[in-house]
Image (cartoon, rainbow, N blue to C red):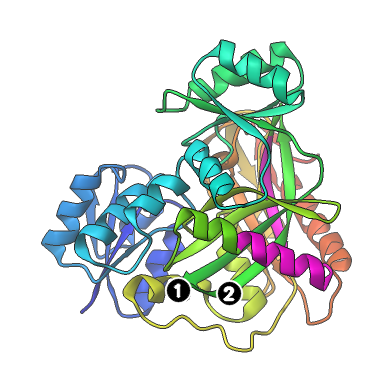
Amino acid sequence: MRKLLILGAGIYQVPLIQKAKEMGLFTIAASYAGPYPGLALADKVYDTDTTDMEGILSIARSEEIDGICTTGTDVAIKSLGFVCEKCGLPGLSFSSALLATDKSKMKKSFLQGGVSTASFYQVFSLEEAIQAFLTLQPPVMVKASDSSGSRGITRAETVEELVYAYDAARSVTKKPYLLVEKFLTGHEIGVDGILQDGTWKLLLPHDKYMYKAGNTTIPAGHSFPFTCSPQMEHEIKRQMSLAALSLGLDNCAVNADLLICDDRVFVLEMGGRAGATCIPELISCYTGVDYYEQIIKNALGEKVSFGEYSEIPCISRLLFCPRAGVLTHLRDYCISQLQTEYTKIQLDYQIGDFIPSVTNGTDRIGSIVHQGFPGQSLNSLSKEMNQILSSLQAAIYVDGIPLHP
């Protein structure tokens, strides 16, 4: 039986573990011990830090794995690239992993590769951050170079906000530097796909829904398809190809944030893994091809294929709680009515659990994936989703108060 090592066992890795088992693979999960649902699903578990590259390599060698992968997180990407390179396994290289998990190095690679991206400065002190702020002219984005899930990423319009943003980024980074980037005004989209042997096997732009928590903007959902002109579609693919080439990404899933400003496309960030926020589930709905299965095939060196996919419109939204508290009540009858063949609802907490107030993308308390019918407009689908979201929020009580009265 072939063995697949999956880095992480959290809510985003659960579908990957489940699909691997369905494919007849022996699943090995590497994760810290804790309340991670994937630990009970994997065939074998190693209690380890997924950022411990040598430790993960030791597991890979002792288990003689056939492939390694993860999804929805950047934390383990360096270990993944390290193991792929040392063991000769399919997947992104270690050098690519280093670039794709450091926003400062990533942006420098973008410039060298001719990628259209926002102006930026790498800063090592508050004084340098203030100088970058004044040079770029506000507003700016202050970013921890090694974070994901919107942690340590804050918009600043004043020097006072810059100081707060600087401290927030410093509190989560392990790097001696931060990124101060010019804030661009435009329409932000996401783009996901799979690269195999230098070829895009799938490349899909999608619209994003955002949730504002203070000065931090968090991805709160996505929708497919994204409609644009043939010229814009070509430019999106061109910039994605330049960005992937500049980072050396190949034989991996790719997730990127792009900004469309009039007729220009700017690449904000790019990662060497599938996106979170239910993106793999949406791609599976939209194409009719299981995205997790294709990710696993890529990790095993098998041919990735989507064929003539179906293009079913679909949309996702995450649930957040604006205030911390205890989940005290669920109106189960309402939730069961909302849950249908075309509407999948997942709650990440149980009654009695403490729920954090939302500060970044990891603070989700659940998700909704809603599938439409062929030819349905996104406007119509969005209205349906808003009704579902409102009803679900009214059925979830934190400290005795519904999320949405």
Task: Name the amino acid type tagged 1.
Answer: Gln
Residue 96, horizontal then vertical, whole percent = 40, 53
Whether pointer 1 and pointer 2 mark residues with C-beta atoms closer than 8 Å, the reply is no
Which image quarter is the N terminus in?
bottom left
User: How many residues crowd mark 1 within 10 Å: few (<14), some (14–19), many (20+)?
Assistant: many
Q: Mark 2 points at which residue?
A: 202
Task: Name the amino acid type tagged 2.
Answer: Leu
Residue depicted at 29% across the width and 75% down the height: 25
Residue reaching furthest to the left:
62
Q: Name the residue under label 1.
A: 196
For the residue pair 385 and 141, the one nearer the viewer reads as 141
**Magenta segment:** 217-240
For the residue pair 17 and 346, the one nearer the viewer reads as 17
Which image quarter is the C terminus in?
top right
Residue depicted at 22% across the width and 51% down the height: 56
Which corner quadrant of the image does residue 131 belong to? top right
Q: Is residue 367 above or below residue 235?
A: above
Residue 5, horizontal then vertical, whole percent = 28, 62
Q: In this view, does 120 lie above or below 207?
A: above
